[in-house]
Amino acid sequence: MQQRLMQLVQEERVPHALLFCGPAGAGKMALALAFASQLLSGEKASVAEDDGFMMAAEDPRVTKNKAMLREWTHTDLHFTFPTIKLPSMGSDHQPVSNDFVKQWIALLKEGPYFSIEQWMTTMGAANQQAIITGAESDELSRKLALKSSQGGYKVSIIWLPERMNLTSANKLLKLLEEPPQQTVFILVSEHPEQLLETILSRTQRIDIKRIDEASIEKALIDKRGIEPDAAHRIARIANGSWLQALDALNTGNENRDFLDMFIMLMRLAYGRKVKDLKKWSENIAGYGREKQRRLLSYFMHLVRENFMYNFRQPELNYMTQEEEDFAKNFARFIHEGNIIEINELMALAYRDIGQNANAKVVFYDLALKMIVLILKK
């Protein structure tokens, strides 16, 4: 992939808009940052034998550019990302990326692999959903209208463009239709199918595949000092995502709490404990909406894994040891007679939460219907 991008630079055929697509943790942002750095460094580049971009001879201008890029503060590098509205913001203020630029730079300095959940925590999000506002597109248009401060490219990296509201998306479309001179847009998307077709048609799409299991396993052993057996299991669970591999290493990670909530739901549903299920749903309703959607995604993952566990083919399962310990006794309750309905029920809840439905109602309804489905023969 890097060779393909470098060839575009060497042949002076860099498109004005690139769309890097792929699952979370596959390295899209890492590639976007590396490519932006190459464009803005002022150097002619060649491809390294192993990985990344190699730079040619340096001059003072290049040295200055590289110093700014190390801090992610290059004056011709512009970041756009989802934001939230903080209580301290005025009623008429639409949040823009500049409101959170210090937090964003701090996150980038920790490394190019991070999730929307980590970013929400960094911003101090509570019960909001992060979006890219129309005001952000206006701000970006203003910035890109200025001449390049270093006399070369201007690069706009837009992280998770699928989170643009309609106003923002239409304004970005206008920018892509009439791009400012020497400007390169790099859109980094996990769900490109949610973008406007007109935006898709004006970008050159590059699909980034999941990281292969062997590479994740090797990195865990070499860079993290993990024992081979543990590294092998984590690499399988990671499903091609370095982010998921890192999460699995974190003993306090969110999925452990989600597993407890899943176990509680299924035990209460099996015991038909309606009052306790109401308390369970009220507890979940206290989460922020982003966390509720992550929980439902995790539930759907566990339902699938428990169904597959019944086939007694370990190569088909992707579970932690704790998840597998629970599946040993629970998996038989997820079978051909209810798997589709349970998945549909959780998918509907996921959609409703995304549309700002009353969380107490959504989760209590899910819990009550689970009584019928979990006992279905």
Image (tube, rainbow, N blue to C red):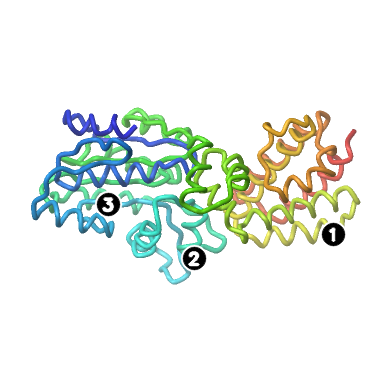
Q: Position of residue 27 (x, y in %)?
A: 42, 42
Taking the spot 55% from the left edge, 63% from the top edge, the residue there is 126
Q: Amino acid at mark 3?
A: His
**Which of the two labelled residues, at mark 3 and mark 2, occupies the earlier sequence position?**
3
Q: Position of residue 265 (x, y in %)?
A: 79, 52
Tell me whether circle 1 and circle 2 mark residues in contact (CB < 8 Å).
no
Taking the spot 41% from the left edge, 31% from the top edge, the residue there is 207
**Which of the two labelled residues, at mark 1 and mark 3, occupies the earlier sequence position?**
3
Q: Position of residue 291 (x, y in %)?
A: 60, 55
Q: Secondary structure at mark 2?
A: loop
* Quarter of the image where one finds residue 235: top right
How packed mark 2 is, by other alpha carbons closer than 10 Å (few <14, some 14-19, many 20 or more), is few
Q: Position of residue 102 (x, y in %)?
A: 34, 65
* Quarter of the image where one finds residue 346: top right
**Which of the two labelled residues, at mark 1 and mark 2, occupies the earlier sequence position?**
2
- Which residue, given by chain and number where applicable, does mark 1 sit on? 276
Q: Is residue 284 above or below residue 203?
A: below
Comparing 219 with 7, the one in front is 219
69 relative to 259 in the view: left or right: left
How packed mark 3 is, by other alpha carbons closer than 10 Å (few <14, some 14-19, many 20 or more), is some
How packed mark 1 is, by other alpha carbons closer than 10 Å (few <14, some 14-19, many 20 or more), is some
Q: Secondary structure at mark 3?
A: strand
Q: Amino acid at mark 1?
A: Asp
Comparing 48 with 346, the one in front is 48
Q: Is residue 350 above or below residue 206?
A: below
- Which residue, given by chain and number where applicable, does mark 2 sit on? 124
Tell me whether circle 3 and circle 2 mark residues in contact (CB < 8 Å).
no
- Which residue, given by chain and number where applicable, does mark 3 sit on? 78
